[in-house]
Image (cartoon, coloured by chain):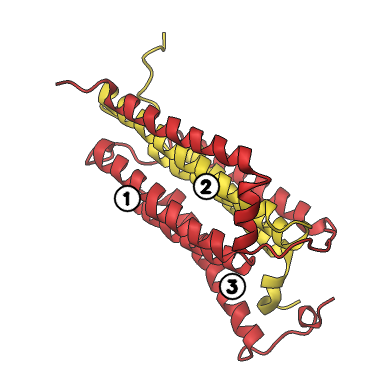
Chain colours: A yellow, B red
Amino acid sequence: MSLLTLYNNINSFLVIGAILFGLGIYGMVTRRTLIGMLIAAELILAGASVNFMAFNRFTSPDPVAGQVFTLFIMAIAAAEAAIGLSIIIAVYRQFKSIDAEDTVQLKG
Amino acid sequence: MNPSMVISPSFFSVDGLVGAVFLIMVAITLIGGLIACNSERLVRSVAGLIVCFVGVAGLYYFLNSPFVAMMQILIYVGAVAVTISFAIMLAAPEEQKRVGPSGPLVGPFGFATAALLAGGFSILAIRTDWKVMAKINDGSVKTIGIQLLTEYSMVFELISIVLLIAILGALVIARGGREG
């Protein structure tokens, strides 16, 4: 197995999906701003999609199911981004900040 | 087993060049992901996200799905990233007051969690012996279209309703507190 034949192997795609997922988790934990967290969530969804497409290409008997699933993930991600960003804009209007630690109105 | 998986191809053969393009796509994806979750300014973070999505579209091309690769660029790069840039311009303050992580332990613990998850999934993926099954259709764009409107038609309709409600809800929420 050399570096140049990695594209023909399911493991390389699964490892890339896992690394994207890990990057997303890292960003989600360490980011302070809500928009940064949303960007990290997009990375997590990209990792999941890469996994679905890898299984679709290499192991699944029906090569349509994974592609349709990835298309639906894209649609859900678009809906999530629209709702999340409008919530962030509403929060900014209320608190004049998008820092996740400034939105503490209910804190006693 | 395909003999090209065992014998390493020369770099200047067709197989070798395809492998090199794949490695470039992987590098684009990972560098974009690193920029997206590490840069100090949100605009650079979105730019890294765009780079990462272009790399992922290249990976989809390697997975025999040019249609999904095009949709990835259209939807993610063309719509989602532009929406996020709009939100940054509308909501982010000019100067981020505090950029770094909120506590001294957040960075190391976050990195440890992410490394544990990514490493665990990678080891799991490599150690499992994946069974390859025979394909029952060709997975072309035509087949995707037929299956979307027959087998997955219910999900297709539901997802369009979800998108409609999401757009209406986004308008209502973002307009709510507007004075004047």
Residue B162: where, in percent of width, then height? 50, 33
The reply, left or right, for residue B1 in relation to residue B178 is right
Quarter in which the C terminus of chain B is drawn: top left
Mark 1 chain: B
Q: Which amino acid type is marked by label 3?
A: Phe
Q: Chain of mark 3?
A: B
Q: Few, some or many C-alpha atoms within 10 Å of disc 1 (few <14, some 14-19, many ≥20)? A: some
Residue at 70% from the left image edge and 77% from the top image edge: A5
| Image point (61%, 69%), residue name | B62
Looking at the rendered image, the disc whose residue lies closer to the viewer, 1 or 3, is: 3
Image quarter of residue B155: top right
Q: Nearer the viewer, residue A1 or A78?
A: A78
Residue position marked by numbered label 1 in the rendering = B43
Q: CA distance from mark 1 to mark 3?
A: 28 Å
Task: Report how far apart the C-alphas of labels 3 and 2 lie in the structure.
Answer: 23 Å
Q: Is residue B134 above or below residue B11?
A: above
Asked if badge 1 and badge 3 are on a common chain, one would say yes
The residue furthest top is A108
Q: Position of residue B112 (x, y in %)?
A: 61, 44
Disc 1 or 3, which lies upstream in sequence?
3
Of tags 2 and 1, which is closer to the observer? 2
Q: Quadrant of residue A99?
A: top left
Amino acid found under the numbered disc labelled 1: Val
In contact (CB < 8 Å): disc 3 and disc 2: no
x%, y% of residue A38?
44, 39
Q: Regarding mark 1 in the picture, which secondary structure is present there?
A: helix
Q: Do residues under tags 1 and 3 come within 8 Å of each other at their CB atoms?
A: no
SS of the residue at dot 3?
A: helix
> Is the Cβ of the residue at disc 2 closer than 8 Å to that at disc 1?
no
The residue type indicated by label 2 comes to Met
| Mark 3, residue position | B22
Dot 2 corresponds to which residue? Answer: A74
